[in-house]
Image (tube, rainbow, N blue to C red):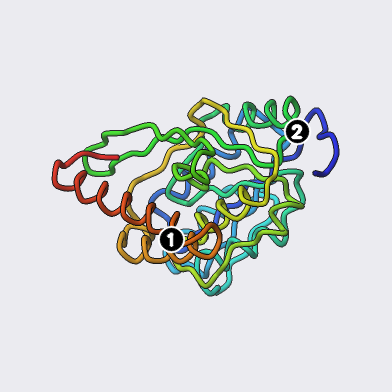
Amino acid sequence: MSGKPEKKPRITVITVVYNGEKHLEETIRSVINQTYVNVEYIIIDGGSTDGTLDIIKRYEEKIDYWVSEPDKGIYDAMNKGLACATGDYVAFMNADDWYEPDALEAVADAIVKTEADFITANIRIIDEETKESVIRYSTFDEYGKNIHHQTCFINLSLHKQFPFNTQYQLAADRDLIVRVIKSGVATHFIDKVVANFREGGKGSNMLKYQIELFDSNAKNVGILFALKRFALNMTGRTLLNLLKIKR
């Protein structure tokens, strides 16, 4: 939607963090050590009181912009990052998670070849306790039901038309994905793991998350789709828990 992309499109990566000293350094290093170089890196800190700022300052020469100030939650912070992004495409990487070394190289290549406005790829989901992992294939079927925002690369001008809806505390990323897909933009899926996600954290309150997701799906797609997804998600999660199987 923004014309033919440059041969080296600029990719903005945004990390939002609050008291994330445990894993933030790994996240930062996964961004600044990418094989692809045309990257803008932004960190939005919510006023951390642990060692987070020390880690940020250690790498600030490799960070294009960072700020530390109170916010109204994770999605408010993500919208702050979106507002100051200047790249051709934008992505969000959590302070608990990290990219594969050649992730942005693969994404940039896909941007140039396909000119798609919304690109996703696969993600590795890791259980922090057992260290077991599974691969989630982030295809666009059923409004991207398996897509995680860590694998989303969206045309910046498009993303600014679709900011995160801060009425949701846990499911605003899923809400955004559905709204963008429903708008009919050009999409492309890369069958490659580009990101790693630690299971748990803010979104681990499954019932609250599913209630928010139901509300979003009902508004954006329709009540029948919302009911179907709610029933499948809750039944599937219950069975997985009973069988002690990681998704």
From what the image shows, is residue 82 above or below residue 124?
below
Q: Residue furthest right?
A: 3
Q: Which residue occupies 75% across, 46% down?
A: 87
Q: Which residue occupies 43% across, 57% down?
A: 224
Residue 179 in picture, x, y percent from top left? 60, 55
Q: Which residue occupies 26% across, 34% down?
A: 132
Relative to 29, 212 lies left or right: left
Front in this rendered view, residue 205 or 73: 205
In space, the residues marked 2 and 1 are separated at their CA atoms by 30 Å
From what the image shows, is residue 15 above or below residue 67?
above
Looking at the image, tell me whether mark 2 or mark 1 is earlier in sequence order: 2
Amino acid type, callout 1: Leu
Q: Residue furthest front?
A: 224
Residue that label 1 marks = 213
Relative to 39, 227 lies left or right: left
From what the image shows, is residue 121 above or below residue 202?
above
Relative to 89, 201 lies left or right: left
Q: Which quadrant holds residue 205?
A: bottom left
| Quadrant in which the C terminus is drawn | top left
Q: Secondary structure at mark 1?
A: helix
Residue 86: which numbered mark, if any? none
Residue 103 in picture, x, y percent from top left? 57, 31
Residues packed near mark 1 inside 10 Å, few (<14), some (14 to 19) or many (20 plus): many
Amino acid type, callout 2: Glu
Q: Secondary structure at mark 2?
A: loop
Residues packed near mark 2 inside 10 Å, few (<14), some (14 to 19) or many (20 plus): many
Front in this rendered view, residue 45 or 118: 118
Residue 74 in picture, x, y percent from top left? 50, 64
Residue that label 2 marks = 115
* Closer to the eye: label 2 or 1: 1
| Quadrant in which the N terminus is drawn | top right
